[in-house]
Amino acid sequence: MEAEKPSDFIREIVETDLRAGTHGGAVVTRFPPEPNGYLHIGHAKSICLNFGIAREYGGRCHLRFDDSNPTTEDMEFVRSIQEDVRWLGFDWGEHLHFASDYFEALYDYALALIEQGLAYVDSSSEAEIRERRGTVTEPGTPGPFRDRSIAENRELFTDMRAGKYPDGAHVLRARIDLASPNMKMRDPLLYRIRHAHHYRTLDRWCIYPLYDFTHCLSDSIERITHSICTLEFENNRELYDWILEHVGVPEPRPHQYEFARLNLNYTVMSKRRFIELVETGKVRGWDDPRMPTLAGVRRRGYTPEALRAFAARIGVSKHNSVVELGLLEFTAREDLDPRSPRAMAVLRPLELVIDGWPAGKVDTLDAPYWPDAARPGSRPVPMSGRLYIERDDFALEPPRGWHRLAPGARVRLRHSEVIECTGVETDAAGEPLRVRAKLVEPTARVKGTLHWVSAEHAVDAEVRLYERLFSAEQPGSDGRDVLDDLNPDSLVVVTAKCEPSLAAARPGERFQFERQGYFYVDPVDSRPGAPIFNRTVTLRDTWAKLVQREQAPAAEAEREAREVIHVESELPPGARALRDAHGLDAGSARVLAGSPALEALFRGALAAGAEPRAAASWLVSELPASGVAPEAARFDGPALAALIALVERGAITRTVGKEVLIELARSGGAPEAIVGARGAHALDEGALAALVDEIIAANAPLVARYRAGNPNLLGALVGQVMKRSAGRADAKRAGELLRARLG
Ligand code: ATP
Ligand code: MG
């Protein structure tokens, strides 16, 4: 699921340098974390970028600990960071480096600046230095120490190192330009005195170099070619170049390039903030599955493949933006679907008795693990006359559009019988205690399919239901404290009734609990025979429809089970008006009405002739895949209408249409032009027929099984046609052609 070959402005720079031979064909990058905390999802973006570029261009990527700050660094973080980078699938080979290994070299470079009159020891206080630095509108003013002689500076600096002065007595500063429009160039600090124990150099040093001095020189010492960092460092680039030039590093020198850091809504992405959460006990540790740390998402059940796919999907740009957490979750579902066998677990049980079921009778069903009937694997599931169903799947007074169980309603039990609810016993408060049902003929029409477990066979298991850690879209905004925005319901623990096969689940295994979500067997707290399940991600949200559509071959029951149910009475007035005026489904109307920008795009597309349901579907289900917020999308209603027209006309497939929409959202442009530039027009009938024949010829075993009576395999063959055509084949027409050819 990872994009074939990423392309972005940084890779373009690398390619230009390779063509020009700037670094003699070398591509050397580095990932330079400070070991002062655990890595987070934002770091994953940087890791994928740095290690990815090295891999793609035959270069190498160093792992360098930027450890020049003695008070916050720790071996435990060095260990966890290495574990996380490896887990993500990257390897630094022999290039594990520490800035602290360069302290001696850095000291010599500082002396070299002093010898040229380009650095001086300033004995002013911190406040005086700040005061004299000026402001953005006023130049700085020189202090009394700026013109110290080289000899005096040399002696003072040597004595600083020798430990003759207390913290704060002096600093070493570069002597550049106090009037520079770039504040970073106004005689920046290079060294300060710190009588502190360093976790690696112990007590050997009492002066420590600052970031700007350390970073560029470390890059140069390691012969880094492309030093990639986040946009906050844009103003530091001038200083980066100045230092390398003035200590005499010859060209070709490393160069710094900046990209936009990853921001996710409903998330904070700062190691310092995490320390606070961990130390105040708001979470259970750095690897709490609610934490956006790599250790946290790993324990929650995310895979490295999902994170890499996410990094590829969000791309690399020069503009800061906020990515929807929903996009990460969507990517996780896409990744987990094919690797998670299905199982049944009832999270909030309600008893159901089938009247007339012979006492003691147990049917053992052979339930397939996968919705794709062609995929092997199944487990026995016992069925009896007393079951548990989900509390939420029963309503005494069902709202309109209810697809689940209610008095008189019929549903299918997954993998099993069709039942009709004949009655319900309630407690004094009117809460259902036990549902009664009878079997009806298996061919009866039903509204929906429910998951269930046999009561006497069920095994209890702890299930940890995780929700987002913060309830505010931008935690800590509008003057609130980040901690005020914590979601009090971010963890709900339930004892679920599970089908018996789940008792054998091993730590690290993944399941899809039908109709609930993806679950991961907690690798830390689970015990043999007593697995604890972490919910990685739920099955549904506004993104669910996309998943649904992309799983065309999935079994009918599965699709029914996933249906998003929007209860009409909850619909706000704005959404109701949109639904009624344009014949939209309640879910889409709700999403459109919830965002002025989306609604404006919707109305713009309608004014340009788009069909309302089509416009709604593209905006609600497909636009989120771009990761671009509707307010920031670079297209307008008429462009969307033009895209829809291309798809409706059959000029492009829906699959290609989705990619075009992503490009429109991110970069703007005209749909026709994008399609033309990509050569992405739909295959014509002749080309499609030829491709279908090719796929039939290449898949003899699948074809034989299809002909032997396994109709579900058609989906697999259609999938191959789609894949081979890079989305340019029409899936429906491909299915028709295949069916016709295979008789
Ligand atoms: P914090 O402020 O939380 O400590 P940091 O940015 O200082 O984080 P570093 O250890 O300095 O953390 O980061 C290592 C590398 O990861 C740097 O190159 C930095 O630019 C990059 N990085 C950090 N956060 C992000 C992010 N949100 N998105 C992309 N890259 C990031
Ligand atoms: Mg930092």
Image (tube, rainbow, N blue to C red):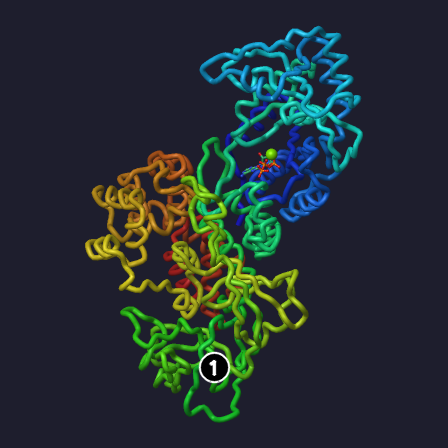
Residue 73 image offset from top left, x and y in percent: 69, 38
Residue 378 image offset from top left, x and y in percent: 56, 73
Residue 586 falls in image quadrant:
bottom left
Residue at image x 34%, y 73%? 447
**Image: 725 above or below 539:** above
Residue 267 image offset from top left, x and y in percent: 49, 46
As drawn, the residue found furthest toward the left would be 581
Name the side, left or right, on which 92 lies relative to 138: right
Q: Secondary structure at mark 1?
A: strand
Q: Nearer the viewer, residue 650 or 274?
A: 274
Residue 133 falls in image quadrant:
top right
**Image: 445 above or below 476:** below
User: According to the image, label 1 marks what residue?
Assistant: 387
Residue at image x 65%, y 73%? 529
Q: Quadrant of ligand 2?
A: top right
Residue 675 shows in this picture: no
